[in-house]
Image (cartoon, grey):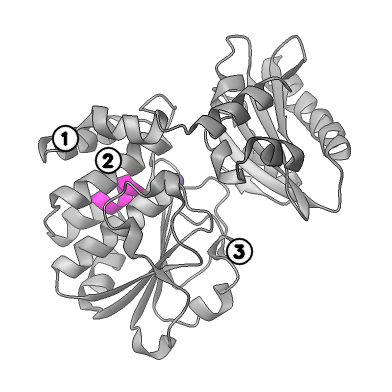
Amino acid sequence: MNQALTEIIPVLSNARNVLIATHVFPDADALGAQLALGNILRSMGKQVYLYSEEPAHYILEFLPGAGKLNIGLPPLDRFDCGVALDCGDDMRLGEKREHLLTIHPFVVIDHHTGHRNFGDIRWVDQGKSSTGEMVYELAQGMGAAIDYDTAYCLYSAIVSDTGSFKYASTTPDTLRIAGDLIAKGVKPAEISGKIFDNFTRNRLLLLQEVLATLALYEDEQLAVITVTRQLYEKTGTTPADTELFINYPRSLETVKIAAFVKEAKDYVGVSLRSKGQYDVAQVARKFGGGGHRNAAGFKLPNKSIAEVQKELLAELHVVLELAGK
Ligand SMILES: [Mn+2]
């Protein structure tokens, strides 16, 4: 068994009152892993507090237990262990990160490339498809049973973070674990429907508007889509409705790197996706962000969309030149 995992198992086994956090604006991997670990620790007789800054977004409400997140922080002295799941760095814990990190021991479980160490005990493995996969292995290591709801959350985490087992991060272990979760009664078609075929009418209208912004560069190897605050207003949507939109420019046969430029109130955010050896995590880090080789992002405050696009195109040009020749 992995060395870090052997350190974490006794810590969690001995803890009695555990706070579990994940990153702000959680995706299905983050929230699925959080809910699953909560169930697993409760089944071992522990008190669990599932910390979140805000309620789960409606797109993730289908996850069993998503409606029962604990919003905000209680007095922290009651916790004898904290856990951060799927957080590439402590900033991702959100506004209360400094408070959260006063809990000791603080356990970190993550799979992001470019992970920046924080907490007391870390299990960081960039070879894992998802934090859901890691929580499954943790449950196995602790000898904890995985019930149907937990299997449902873990399968959702894994299928989401692997883009339906399509990304390079999908390993034989990923598929073996997914198979075991299906054997526990999880229905792949049901979960795929919830994660990938979950559009509201307004969200589809937003997609239509965003796809109309598609711009291609570098012999159609680079695709950029853009969303403005005005488009959210026009379609009655929010930033959370853009989840997975970046897969559309990425799906173009010639595209090596796809970028999604998102205007927010105080900053411009950029999500990057790439195929194969094209490393977008290094680009994101240059702009103060992070992520995996094939999926990364960053935010720039006080810049216009045009300025961000110009700087981004220059950096991505370099990546395409270096990797492609
Ligand atoms: Mn993840």
Above or below residue 76? Residue 230 is above
Pointer 3 local density, CA inside 10 Å: few below 14, some 14–19, many at least 20? some
Q: Position of residue 131 (x, y in %)?
A: 37, 49
Q: Is residue 293 visible?
A: no
Please tell me in which quadrant of the rendered image residue 5 appears.
Answer: bottom left
Query: Of the residues shown, which amino acid type is indicated by label 1?
Result: Ile
- Residues drawn in magenta: 132-136
Of the 4 image quadrants, the one containing the C terminus is top right
Secondary structure of residue under mark 1: helix
Secondary structure of residue under mark 3: helix
Q: Mark number for residue 264?
A: none
Above or below residue 317? Residue 71 is below
Q: Distance between the residues labelled 1 and 3?
A: 35 Å
Q: Where is residue 87 in the image (x, y as percent from the top left)?
A: 50, 57
Direction from residue 288 to residue 66 in the image, left or right? left
Q: Which residue is drawn at 12% across and 59% down?
A: 143
Q: Mark 2 points at which residue?
A: 155
Q: Position of residue 294 (x, y in %)?
A: 55, 32
Asked whether 135 or 155 is in front, the reply is 155
Q: Which residue is drawn at 18% across and 40% down?
A: 181
Question: Mark 2 or mark 1, which has the lower sequence index?
Answer: 2
Q: Name the residue under label 3.
A: 91
Query: Of the residues shown, which amino acid type is indicated by label 2?
Result: Tyr
Asked whether 69 or 26 is in front, the reply is 69
Please tell me in which quadrant of the rendered image residue 144 appears.
Answer: bottom left
Report if the CB atoms under discs 2 and 3 are less than 8 Å apart: no
Direction from residue 189 to residue 202 in the image, left or right? right
Query: Of the residues shown, which amino acid type is indicated by label 3?
Result: Met
Q: Mark 1 points at which residue?
A: 182
Question: Mark 1 or mark 3, which has the lower sequence index?
Answer: 3
Secondary structure of residue under mark 2: helix
